[in-house]
Amino acid sequence: MLTLGIYRFWMKTRLRRWYWSAIRPGGQPLEYVGDPIEKLLGFLIAVVILAFYIGIVNLLLMFLSFSLFQGNGAAYLLSFLGVIPLWFYARYRARRYILARTRWRGLRFGLAPGAWGYAGRALWHWTVTLLSLGLLLPRMTFHLEKYRTDRTSYGTAMMVQGGRWQMLYPAMRPLFGAAALTGVAALALNFGPTPAPGIGLAMLAAAAAVYGLVHYRVRTLEMLTANKTLDGVALTLDASPFRILMIHVLGYLLAGVAILLPLMVLGFVIMGLHFAELATESGATQIVLLENLPRWLLIGVSAMLYFTIFLIWSALTHTFVTMPVTRHYARGLRVLNPARIEAIRQRPRDEVVQAEGFAEALDVGASI
Amino acid sequence: MSTLLRVGAAPAPFAAEAQYLDGACPRPEPVRLGIDETAQELVIARDDGIDLRWPLTAIREVPDQAGGDLFVLRLRDDPLQRLLLSDRDLAPRLPNLRCRAPVTKRRQLVLWAMAAVASVALIIGVLVPRLADQLAVFIPPEGERALGEVTLEQIRSALDQTGVAPVPLCEAPEGMAALSAMTDRLTDGQTMPLEITVSVLDHEMVNAFALPGGQVVLFRGLIDTAERPEEVAAVLAHELGHVVSRDPTRHALRSAGSIGVLGLLFGDFAGGAVVLFLAERLIDAQYTQAAEAGADAFAHDLLLAADVAPGALAEMFRRMRELGGEPEGLVAHFLSHPALGDRIEAAREATPEDFTPTPLLDDGGWSALQTICDD
């Protein structure tokens, strides 16, 4: 904050170095060799390009939206839709940068260029998935993962994603269950004598859907990992969906409890400001606690609290969510047939001039 | 080089086991480490008998390692080779362990930083305003009206500090009648490009602004400060000048473009604060000097045509300047224009010598307007 967010490039680099060194497949740590300066540079390049796009496009959309639809809803929707391809593009670029800066046993990983191809395929698969009401979700998951994996290399070896997309259907079971429950709940709500059982079923269905999503994510990850090969080296991943879900639930709960106190103080200050103003306005002479403090001080304190809350939240979610999730996955990862690794050799450096600038500017997910 | 004075026995020779990665093949190689004290070099003994020698001053630590059980070393000018030690016993012998790598891309960085600043400035300062000016003329009246309504909502929410409800509009019926009588008198016989809506916000700021779609908003503070209805009418006429030249529409389109760009720069971390700040800026619409002068001239003509002395505008400006202690709202807005004195002068001079004004509102009307916010 003090550096207007510029320090975040250094922070990310240090965090990643730490996480990478903690992940040790076969006892050997990963190493992250990204450079904050190149991240900053990439961000600046992205700003130059995106500023044009966003400034001009937003303005045009706002104009069209008010001219044709008399409201700004259409503009927001369209500018959101317009950013989606960029979003996929940015994710692929960020992945390429991160892999290019990751080493294991001294060799670099790499991802071949192909961000626009990825964005196009991602859009197509998302459209198909949405049109099929989610039934073709495994097809999307598989093909996008295959696109990424088949372009991933470790040293001189290329990674290959094997298997078929149909193999992912078993991971959908809890989601199908949740869908069935939703159907029953809808029936109970519409035709049942009292709404109570219907509401209970709907809540159950929502919980099942949340679990279902986590289950799908973890199980597909396991299956996809088990079908990846790298010049005869194979991988297996063993993870528990329930464990991952619990880490998220408990982690966010803990972080939430921790920010409650500063949130309450912030609320108190804001209320205080308001009452002080009311008191002044109505000419009341009784002393309101915060009235005698200068306004800028109160605003300063509020701003400090606001950022404190952000800091606590991000630090605690790292401690209680990102770290345990990473640890859980890292512990379950096995390298089969490691002897074959020794035949692999170093690959040349991939400069990736823009680093992950687009992802940074567009704020594309990824907690670290 | 410092001079070492050795007293007693020489220090115990250093010896340790480590793993070495050459950065060419992925096999960690077990090596034995020793120190050549005369050459001040770390000797890395490999199984093939070919020793590697790293100058102690050129060895750097790879920082931020998790677990604390690994001490990872690299050579200053070599990006690939690594030495993995299981303890930090060697650390005291390595003087430059934590030296930073020199920044190699400084030139590039400065260039791109300047390019980023320049392109954002170009977009916000030139491109977006130009485009907005062009487009403002083409936006149909219904669209403009909707834009104005959305903007008014945003401003009302931004001004509200309770976080509960937007700042209320004042709508006492007698006051509204007086206000519309005043507006009709000003616009009578004029061809306005848009239907004019005048409303009053229940807020103590001494301010007024025009919004797209012919909306003019007065603050209660302005009516409270004015001593005659003519002074309120003068400010109203000035804002009508902005409406006629479509300044607010331009301004709203500009900020639509700029908000996205600024949001991009600051990210979500400070995003909320930025949006708030921008909403605040909307009110303090900084039109150009030319736009302000144009609105003033328009107001002079409008007031004369309505038999009101344009000098009222001068009185209002003077009153605002006297309020100077309160650096917000219209005062700050006008103070930022160095030519306020000139504008007061211009408003005074716009009143002809032999001018006989017709009163704008009777006493009843004026007091109704003053109490428009009382329910």
Image (spheres, coloured by chain):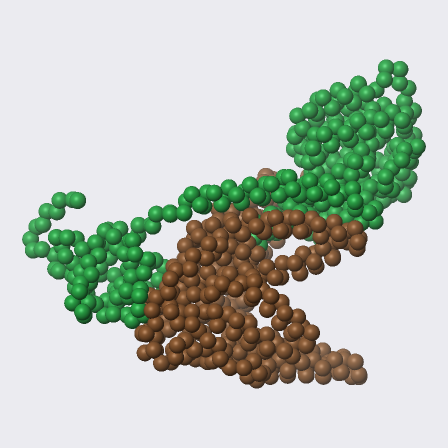
Chain colours: A brown, B green
Q: Is residue A281 visible?
A: no
Image vertical order of residue A111 relative to residue A215, above or below: above
Image vertical order of residue A243 relative to residue B303, above or below: below
Say how many tags the image has. 0
Report x, y in % for residue B131.
Answer: 70, 43
Q: Is residue B338 left or right of residue A335?
A: right
Nearer-the-camera pick, A171 or A140? A140
Q: Is residue A297 left or right of residue B327?
A: left
Nearer-the-camera pick, A204 or A102? A102
Residue at the spot x=41%, y=47% of the render? B105
Nearer-the-camera pick, B290 or A93? A93
Nearer-the-camera pick, B212 or B6? B212
Residue at the spot x=32%, y=78% of the render? A339
Residue at the spot x=18%, y=60% of the render? B43
Report x, y in % for residue A349.
Answer: 39, 60
Q: Is residue A180 left or right of residue A228?
A: right
Report x, y in % for residue A3.
Answer: 48, 46
Report x, y in % for residue A241.
Answer: 52, 78
Q: Is residue B88 visible?
A: yes
- Residue sitting at the far left: B8
Q: Is residue B370 left or right of residue B20?
A: right
Quarter containing the C terminus of chain B: top right
- Residue A229 found in image quarter: bottom left
Image vertical order of residue B13 relative to residue B165, above or below: below
- Residue A345 found in image quarter: bottom left
Image vertical order of residue A132 relative to residue A99, above or below: below
